[in-house]
Amino acid sequence: MSSVFSDDIAIDLGTVNTLVHVLGRGIILDEPSAVAVRNVGGEREVLAVGLKAKAMLGRTPESIELIRPLRDGVIADFIATEEMLRQFIKRAKSKFGFRRPRILICVPASATPVERRAVYETAVSSGSRRVYIVEEPVAAAIGAGMPVDEPRGSMVVDIGGGTTDIAVLSLGGVLQARSLRCAGNAFDEAIIRYVRRRHQLLIGEANAERIKIEAGTAMVDGNDRAVDIHIRGRDLRAGRPKSIVLSSGNIAEALDHPIDDITDFIQRSLEDLPPDIAADICENGICLTGGGSLIDGLNVELERRVGVAFTVPDWPLHCVIRGSAMILQNLDKREHLLLTP
């Protein structure tokens, strides 16, 4: 009866985007993790969250501040995160949900006990009845449909906005889970640095993200994405607006360093595994999920550098939230995967 009068909610609380899944209704919210606040007499007044807040990026007066409440997958601003979660949960609840919801929320594999506790307390104070926590790559492996219950090793690499997470599972348990704070945001920063260094042109985060989405590729040679992208920014020497054109090869050159960091991270993870598990992974390949996996040719480039096949599922952006919902739906069988807050 409790499920009739309350909504069970799974939340993928990401550095860039937050997704909300209500059991029985599916993914009902996918919005930027952003909060716009106005400073009035020393107090902060929340003006907008999600899409409305992100639309203000780079266009706000001094009195209005756009906050990214999460940094590298963990909470950097407790009050802003709490308000953002409260509004998202309010939108997710159905009119028939009289009781406060149960919530399962994801954290990076490297989150410390203090950071996990911060997520737990923020979710509790935002209006939930019971809060559960799970590591993002574990949820991603389940959401990608990997054979995690079988007696063989399954490895997933989840490239999000703030962190790249790796999990290795076998027989329904976690053998290894770790994080690297280099992911989608690092790709944006690499593009900004490249344009500044090569063309003395200053561009913003939103522009860099657009370049990554429209022309991003991991392959300097042999890529099929022959895209030229026009960029407008401020000339650092003359101080006036300037336009340049970048090719997909230029973007691949810009992304080489963060991809190299992710490659080293994956190789170190493979080296730390027991020989039999490592052999399973070399035979079955590695699953690549998260928004970073959508970069053209990234799976091919990682395969070339690591020497193991990489596959990308049909909905890489939704693997974490789908896996979270599956865990929440089968808590009695998956309870051992939950973290202690």
Image (cartoon, rainbow, N blue to C red):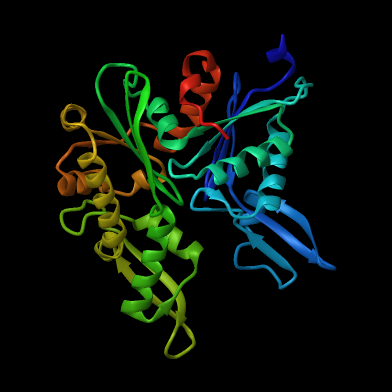
Relative image position of residue 66 (x, y in whole percent): 65, 61
Q: Which quadrant of the figure contains the N terminus? A: top right
In the picture, measured across the screen, residue 101 lies left or right of residue 110, that is right
Q: Residue at x 42, y 89 (%)?
A: 237
Residue farthest toward the right in the current orientation of the protein:
41
Is residue 218 positioned above or below 85 on the image? Answer: below
Please give the name of the residue rendered at 58% of the width and 35% of the height, measured from the top-left corner. 341
Residue 211 appears in the picture as rendered: no
Where residue 135 sits: x, y (%)?
Answer: 46, 35
Give the residue furthest to the top.
1
Q: Is residue 81 left or right of residue 46?
A: left
Of 233 and 330, which appears nearest the observer?
A: 330
Q: Total of numbered circles in the picture?
A: 0
Query: In the shown orientation, is residue 61 left or right of residue 274?
Result: right
Q: Position of residue 259 (x, y in %)?
A: 28, 55
Q: Can residue 2 be seen in this snapshot?
A: yes
* Residue shown at the point (46%, 25%) measured from the top left: 337
Name the image quarter holding residue 55.
bottom right
Along the line of sight, which residue is nearer the eye, 203 or 156? 156
Q: 275 and 304: which one is in front? A: 275
Q: In this view, does 259 lie above or below 335?
A: below
- Give the residue at x 74% y 26%: 100
Q: Give the percent coordinates (x, y) of residue 287.
A: 30, 34
Lateral position of residue 157 relative to residue 277, left or right: right
- Up-down: is 42 above or below 116? below
